[in-house]
Image: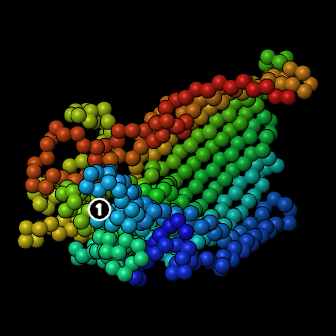
Amino acid sequence: NRMSEFIPSTAQIVQVGTSALPRLFHTDYKQFGPRVGFAWDLFHDGKTVFRGGYGIAYATSPGIALTSNPPFVTTFRFNPSGAKPFTHLESLNADAAAAGANLGSGTIDQNFKNGNVQSYNLNLQRELTPSTILTIGYFGSKGTHLRSRINLNQPVNGVLPFPAISASSPIAPGLPLGKVLDDWVSNGNSNYNALWVTGNRRISRGLQFTANYTWSKSLDYSSQDTFASSDRPSNSLNVRQDYGPSDFDARHRFTFGPVYDLPFQGNRLVSGWRLSGILTLQSGSPINILAGDPAAGTGISSFTGRATIRPDVSGTIPIVNQIITTGPNAGLVQWFPSNIVCDPRGICPANALLTIPVTVVGGSNVYHFGNMSRNALVGPNFRNVDFSLTKTTKITERLSNEFRFEAFDLFNRPNFANPGTVTSNAGRVAVNPTATSLFGVINATRFPNGDSGSSRQLQFVLKLIF
């Protein structure tokens, strides 16, 4: 009873837990989640097995609390004076209404459904030698009713669908609304398809390893993992325009992890040594190009309620991948050209491949949705080698000591992050050629504070085992 929700059908704000709105959204009792699998010994010799499986898993409730809507978000402040030495709650309510309140949390679809993922696979496993197994398989999944967030108040031909709260609303009647009104919905979809090839060698003559190659593609409307405003689709009236590669999509990935027990035997000094490592080779992550708002408040944000929009594209954007040698960005990496953006209102290079989606009609800027798809480009690849040297020494029958030396990113190869993806020309004002712009420029590594390839990190470990 400490939340309120905007009801689009009546344009009212209603308190949750009252007779008018008993629940935040309906309860879904139709979550049937079967699991089925099989394994078939094809030649009845225990060396070739054909397997498959299918299952449905459901997400839990979204855990969304609409506690930032009136009246719970309203702040009351009273400064007494000689003319008004005291006040009461009704006056404070009137003062707050006059100052304007904030519909911070928006609403959640009354027909919200818990998301589900169908997972399925078929794989063939073969024993090549008594210690070596090869597996080839198809693995896929399909997500349905995934949680997403749309803008209910996205302008339509410049007009807000909900300019204000209804005058009959029991809470904040007549409250003006802005260009953003969040609605949590369950209209997201995703799919993942992959070919996996895996080789495993069990310990034999001191050597064991695991190698895996994955060729995959993941598509969705939104790879939402936060509550940030960037999770909203570009066009809330047609979320299918955002269908494209997932933010985490990696088309190719190969890993190889060997472990080798050195064959030295004898005293405690020469025995117990082990070498191991992990080689990771992965293709780049998607890049989503955006046009920024060159006229804040009256530009793109007045068109969709967002500050960015995807541009129009008129050709293939080349990948440069060169170190910049001059200018303010010297030493950084130019991934794709920066001077390929056309602003139809004035600045339009001859080699332009991207166009801010705006035209001038009668002296006014008229925006449209660009034809560039979401996550249309691919960023730098990922290459990494981790290494460890381990020495285990027996102290007593039940007590031993393990010393480990570990190196992350052994060869200190820089794995670059994606380049800057937002650009906005200055309209009719010439672009300053000396100004620093990171559009198309890489200025960071992938995980600058992590241990997965940003720079070489060395670690020493001493462990007592008993």
Question: In the rendering, at what x and y percent does residue 193 appear?
Answer: 56, 65
Name the quarter where the C terminus is drawn. Answer: top right
Q: Residue at x 62, y 66 (%)?
A: 60
Disc 1 marks a residue whose amino acid type is: Ala
Judged left or right of residue 51, residue 85 is left
Judged left or right of residue 348, residue 212 is right
Q: Residue at x 56, y 63 (%)?
A: 63
Question: In the rendering, at what x and y percent does residue 426 appear?
Answer: 15, 52
Let me know if residue 272 appears in the view. no
The residue that label 1 is drawn on is 99
Q: Residue at x 60, y 46 (%)?
A: 255
Judged left or right of residue 222, residue 55 is right
Name the quarter where the N terminus is drawn. Answer: bottom right
Question: In the rendering, at what x and y percent does residue 462 appear?
Answer: 72, 24
Decide: is 458 above or below 249: above
The answer to which of 462 and 110 lies nearer the viewer is 110
The answer to which of 293 and 11 lies nearer the viewer is 11
Question: In the rendering, at what x and y percent does residue 428 appear?
Answer: 9, 55
Classify residue 293 by image quadrant.
bottom left
